[in-house]
Image: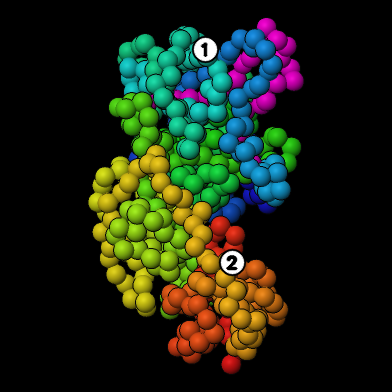
């Protein structure tokens, strides 16, 4: 919670306690579980949430999870697995933390290791959602209910891509949470978390939704809900509630320089979690659709070069040969704007939407191509299918040497024909600012393939002031927008 808001909250609370002029009012939304307390007379027109009813009615479905294993050799806690796989030079790798303390230095050979977390009941017969990283490397799982009853849990399945795991305990007639719709969440809306931070079970914290659809490193299939709800180790796998007492997310990660809460936490949207849970319950594993493309964000300059009014969608920079997208006729330079009618606002939206659809499903992609909107039918492949990675495509003809090169005045580049494409020999000025580097190979200008000085100049002559260059850099391809000198 920002300092200003916290100060206002403290002032209002003090006035109500000392002046005795506050009053409780029922929320005008009958569906809300949360009462509101109005500001004192003459104060700011402000309503503060009261979560007591929500906690009383929903807290019983939140559980404490204790996972353990006997450490026979070297200790290796199973906490922050995926985040620690980021490159060492990634500027954000040390800040995104799954909420599981690493106990490797505390465990001697022969001792038991423990991971602690939270979870919540999604069925009255004992199915429980939690985080995969809470259970990672553990071989024994104990679940403690709100009434202190303890059960040995069975791991039904887990998914490292979304960090969701499904447990089962042998019980009936258990309280369950209500599942909400995270798509209806609004930035600024109040939310609450219930969990067991540092083992303090049934702890309640509250805050607001700070942002939606956040993308984090190594997390391609999860559009995280960002909040300022206080989340700490032990909260992992616990529910995030909206004001109607419905679960809208699964608390999973924090952004921290210290390992503790610093005001930024992330929850997995419950629709993503339930989709994974349903597949784990039916099949014991998760299958995701794939179309076989590499995509990038559409920035303002690229949008201009492709004739778009707004910078949105997912720009295809590579297509896997013989993959679903290739068979459907998708090409580099196509911009995916919708999946089955659902808008793709950012490139990070596309893998989430595709990944939630089963392989073998035919879907309709709305794309932007050559200045107009088109629709393409694609039959999804499986993310587990072994195929050539589009990021490993070569075929750039880098060993060809056809001439000493030429200077392109509109671009300020010195280029040389390189078989398929033009090798960048020297770069300066606006081209350098646009991100071009010496050694890049220009393959296309505004979706037109170029291979020599003549084809390059012709493509530039038919272009507007800003052009999109498809560049091969090592084994990767990307589009860069360049403003021409005219």
- Quadrant of the snapshot with the C terminus: bottom right
Q: Position of residue 402 (x, y in %)?
A: 58, 78
> Which residue was labeled with disc 2?
399
Q: Is residue 279 above or below residue 217?
A: above
> Which residue was labeled with disc 1?
140
Which of these two is toward me, 3 or 470?
A: 470
Q: Position of residue 467 (x, y in %)?
A: 52, 80
Q: Secondary structure at mark 2?
A: loop
Magenta residues (range) = 96-122
Which of these two is toward me, 187 or 343?
A: 343
Residue 32: in sight, yes or no?
no
Say which residue appears at 50% left-offset and 87% top-offset: 454
Kindly report the distance in space between the C-alpha atoms of the residues bearing marks 1 and 2. Answer: 57 Å
Viewer-side label of 1, 2: 2
Q: Is residue 265 above or below residue 123?
A: below
Q: Is residue 168 left or right of residue 231?
A: left
Q: Position of residue 184 (x, y in %)?
A: 39, 49
Badge 2 density bin: few <14, some 14–19, many ≥20, Cα 10 Å: few
Q: Secondary structure at mark 1?
A: strand
Which of these two is toward me, 99 or 71?
A: 71
Q: Is residue 269 above or below residue 389?
A: above
Badge 1 density bin: few <14, some 14–19, many ≥20, Cα 10 Å: some
Residue 450 part of the magenta segment: no
Say which residue appears at 32% left-offset and 17% top-offset: 125
Sequence-first disc among 1 and 2: 1
Q: Position of residue 483 (x, y in %)?
A: 58, 82
């Amino acid at each position: 919670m920002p300092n200003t808001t916290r100060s206002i909250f403290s002032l209002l609370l003090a006035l109500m306690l000392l002046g005795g002029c506050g009053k409780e009012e029922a929320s005008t939304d009958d569906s809300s579980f949360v009462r509101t307390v109005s500001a004192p007379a003459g104060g700011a027109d402000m309503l503060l949430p009261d979560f007591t009813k929500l906690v009383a009615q929903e807290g019983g479905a939140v559980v404490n999870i204790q996972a353990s294993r006997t450490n026979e050799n070297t200790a290796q806690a199973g906490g922050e697995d995926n985040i620690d796989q980021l490159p060492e030079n990634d500027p954000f790798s040390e800040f995104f933390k799954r909420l599981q303390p690493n106990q490797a230095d505390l465990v001697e050979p022969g001792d038991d290791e423990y991971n602690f977390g939270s979870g919540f009941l999604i069925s009255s017969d004992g199915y429980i959602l939690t985080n995969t990283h809470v259970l990672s490397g553990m071989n024994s799982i104990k679940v403690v209910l709100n009434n202190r009853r303890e059960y040995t849990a069975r791991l039904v399945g887990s998914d490292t891509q979304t960090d969701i795991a499904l447990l089962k305990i042998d019980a009936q007639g258990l309280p369950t949470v209500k599942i909400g719709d995270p798509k209806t969440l609004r930035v600024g809306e109040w939310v609450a978390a219930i969990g067991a931070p540092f083992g303090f079970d049934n702890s309640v914290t509250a805050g607001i939704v700070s942002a939606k659809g956040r993308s984090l490193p190594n997390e391609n299939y999860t559009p995280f809900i960002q909040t300022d709800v206080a989340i700490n180790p032990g909260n992992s796998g616990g529910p995030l509630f909206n004001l109607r007492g419905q679960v809208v997310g699964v608390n999973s990660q924090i952004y921290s320089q210290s390992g503790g809460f610093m005001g930024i936490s992330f929850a997995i949207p419950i629709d993503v979690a339930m989709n994974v849970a349903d597949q784990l319950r039916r099949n014991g594993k998760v299958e995701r659709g794939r179309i076989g493309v590499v995509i990038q964000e559409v920035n303002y300059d690229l949008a201009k070069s492709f004739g778009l009014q707004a910078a949105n969608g997912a720009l295809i920079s590579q297509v896997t040969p013989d993959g679903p997208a290739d068979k459907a006729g998708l090409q580099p330079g196509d911009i995916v704007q919708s999946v089955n009618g659902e808008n793709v606002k950012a490139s990070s939206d596309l893998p989430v939407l595709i990944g939630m659809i089963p392989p073998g499903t035919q879907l309709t992609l709305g794309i932007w191509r050559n200045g107009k909107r088109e629709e393409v039918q694609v039959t999804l492949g499986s993310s587990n299918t072994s195929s050539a990675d589009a990021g490993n495509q070569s075929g750039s003809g880098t060993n060809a040497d056809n001439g000493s090169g030429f200077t392109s005045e509109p671009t300020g580049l010195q280029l040389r024909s390189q078989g398929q494409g033009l090798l960048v020999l020297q770069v300066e000025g606006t081209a350098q600012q646009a991100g071009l580097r010496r050694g890049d190979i220009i393959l296309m200008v505004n979706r037109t393939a170029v291979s020599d000085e003549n084809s390059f100049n012709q493509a530039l002559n038919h272009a507007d002031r800003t052009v999109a260059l498809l560049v091969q850099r090592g084994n990767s391809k990307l589009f860069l927008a360049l403003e021409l000198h005219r």
